[in-house]
Image: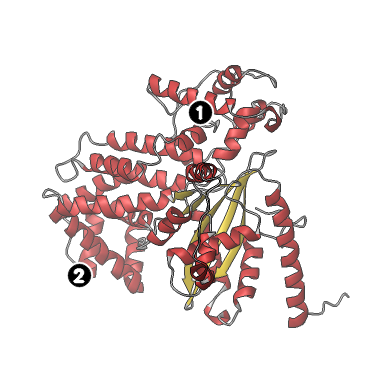
Amino acid sequence: MTKHVLQSRKTFTKDLDEAYTVMTRELKKTIEVQNHVSTTADLWSSNNRSFLGVTVHWIDSVSLKRRKAAIACRRFRGRHTYDRIATEIEDIFSEYGLTPEKITACVTDNGSNFVKAFREYQHVESEEEEGEGEEESGEGEVHFVDLHSVLSADDEDAQLGLCVLPPHHRCAAHTLNLVANNEVDKWLATNPESRAVYRSATAKCSSLWTKSSRSTVAAECVEEVSDRKLIVPTVTRWNSFYDAYSRITEMSLTDINNLCTQFQIKCMNDREYLFLKEYCAIMKPFTVALDIIQGEETCFYGTLQPTLEILMAKTLAMKNGLSPMTTGLPEVIVGAIKTRFAAIIDSKTALLASVSLPKFKLRWVKEEARRDHITLLLTTECRTLTTEELAAVVPDPPQPAAVAPSEEDFFSFEEQVNGSADASMSVETEVTSYLNSAPVMESLHLFPRIKKIALRYNAPTPSSAPVERLFSLGSLVLTPKRNRLSDGRFQRLLLMRFNRFFSQGDGEMG
C-alpha cells in the first residue's frame, strides 16, 4: 500500500513559487511571439485592500481561437488617481514586454480615473511626428535649460513624463449598463404617462423581492405558486433587474396578487402589470445584446458594431402597438446608444474588425453605399500590407463552428454563395472571394491579407468582463479566513488558478 506524505508548508510554498516562475516564463514566451494583443484592466477592493487586475488576450494564428491569460492582480496602495493608475499599468506592461505598438487596445470601464489616464498618457503618432518636425527645423539653435528645476524635480514626476499607454477602448457592456440605468430610468421617471406607474410597479416588485429574500416562509409561498424562486437583482448589473422583472411577469396577475395578499403588501393592478410586460418586451433585445458583448471565447471586437446595429433595429421594431405608458421608449434607447457609442459607430477600427470577421462580413449592412464604403476600406487596408507580412496557408476545407442558439436567433442574415480563393491573388480578387466565402472562422486561412487584418483588429474584447471574472475568482481565494495572505502570495495563487496552470501539463495559457 502506497503511503502519501503531506508536504510541509515550507515545501509547498517553495514548489508554488517554482511553478509560478515557470508559468510566468512560458507566458512571456507566448506573448513575445504574438504580433497583436489586447488587454483589460480594472481596480478591485476586498478586505480593505485594493488591487489592479490586468488580463491579456490574443487570437491564435493557427487555430483562430481566442486565448487569454491574467498577468497581474497587483496591490494598489493610495488613492486611485489617474496618474498612479497610468504608472502601474505601464509598469505591468513593461514587465511582460507589452509595448504600445503590440497592444491594439486596453479595455476598461467608464471610470473617470481610467479615462483620464489614457487620455493624458496615450501614445499619439501625430504628436510624435510634429515633434520630429520641430527638431529638424530647430537644427543649429542653442536651447538653454534651467538646471536647478531639472535636478529638483521629483523622480515620480519624471517617471510620469515617460509613461506611454496604448489606445483605449471603453467597456461596451458598462456603456450599455449606463444607458439602461441612466437614460432609460430617467425617461421613465420623468415622462408624464409612465412616471406614476413606473414608480408604483417597481416599488411593488421591490417589496416582493424583499419579502421572499428575507423570509423562508415567503420563499416557500412563491415556490408553491410559480414553482420557481424570485430573482433578487444586483445593483451593479442591469441584466439582473431585467431577469427579476421578467420572472415576475412570467406569473399571472392573479398569482401575483395572491402573493401580495399573503405578504400584506399592495396588490398590482392591470396597468402596472401591462407596463412591466411592455418594458420587458422592449428591453429583451437589449439584454440579449448585453450577454453577447460580455462573451469571451467567441466574442471579438468585430462583434460590437453588428450587435449595436441589430440592437437598434430590433428596438425600433418594437415601437408599434405600445401603450401610451411606453410609447417613445424605443426611440430614447436608440438615441442614447448613438450618443454614447458615437466614437465607435462607423469608426475605421470597428468597421475593419467587423468586415474581417467571417461571421459578419457585410451581412449586417443594408445600405449599398455603406457596403461599398466598407469594401473600399478593407481593400485599402489590404494594400498597406507588405508581402513579408503575409503567409499563404491553405488548410483543409473548414468545418462550420458551433453557434450558441441565442446568438443564432439574434443575428439572422440572408445566406450568401460560397466561394474559393487562391493563395496568391490580387487584393481585389482576395476581397471579393472572401466576401463570398463561407461564414466560418477557418476560412481566413485562405485569405492571408484578410487574416492579418482580422488578427489585429479583432484582438480586443468588446467589454472588460474578463478582468471582472478575474476578480470574481479572487474573491474565492482572498476569503476572510485567508486575509493574512501576503499581496505577492495572493497574486501567485490567483494568476495560476485563472490561467489554469495546474490543469494543463504543457503549461499552455488560456
Q: Nearer the viewer, residue 236 or 85?
A: 85
Quarter of the figure with residue 426: top right
- Reading the image, the residue beneath label 1 is 361
Q: Is residue 18 left or right of residue 216?
A: right
Q: Position of residue 122 (x, y in %)?
A: 48, 52
Are there few (<14), some (14-19), or many (20+) residues within 10 Å of tag 1?
A: many
**Closer to the camera, 325 or 74?**
74
Total numbered circles: 2
Report crowding for label 2: few under 14, some 14 to 19, many 20 or more residues within 10 A (C-alpha). Answer: few
Left or right side of 463 for 28: right
For residue 148, say whether it is visible. Answer: yes
What is the secondary structure assignment of the residue under circle 1? loop
Q: What residue is shown at x 48% (from left), y 74% (from top)?
A: 46
Who comes first in sequence, dot 2 or dot 1? 2
Q: Which residue is depicted at the point 26% across and 64% down?
A: 206
**Three-letter amino acid code at disc 2?**
Gln
Residue at the extreme left:
192
The three-letter amino acid code for the residue at tag 1 is Lys
Q: Which residue is disc 2 drawn over?
A: 264
Give the answer, above or below, for where 488 lies relative to 230. below
- x, y percentage for residue 229? 37, 61
Q: Nearer the viewer, residue 158 or 207?
A: 158
Task: Find the distance from the CA under tag 2 to the CA under tag 1.
Answer: 56 Å
Estimate the x, y position of residue 392 in percent, counting from the top left: 71, 27
Question: Residue shown at 33%/57% (left/top)?
Answer: 241
Local SS, label 2: loop
Above or below residue 411? Residue 430 is: above
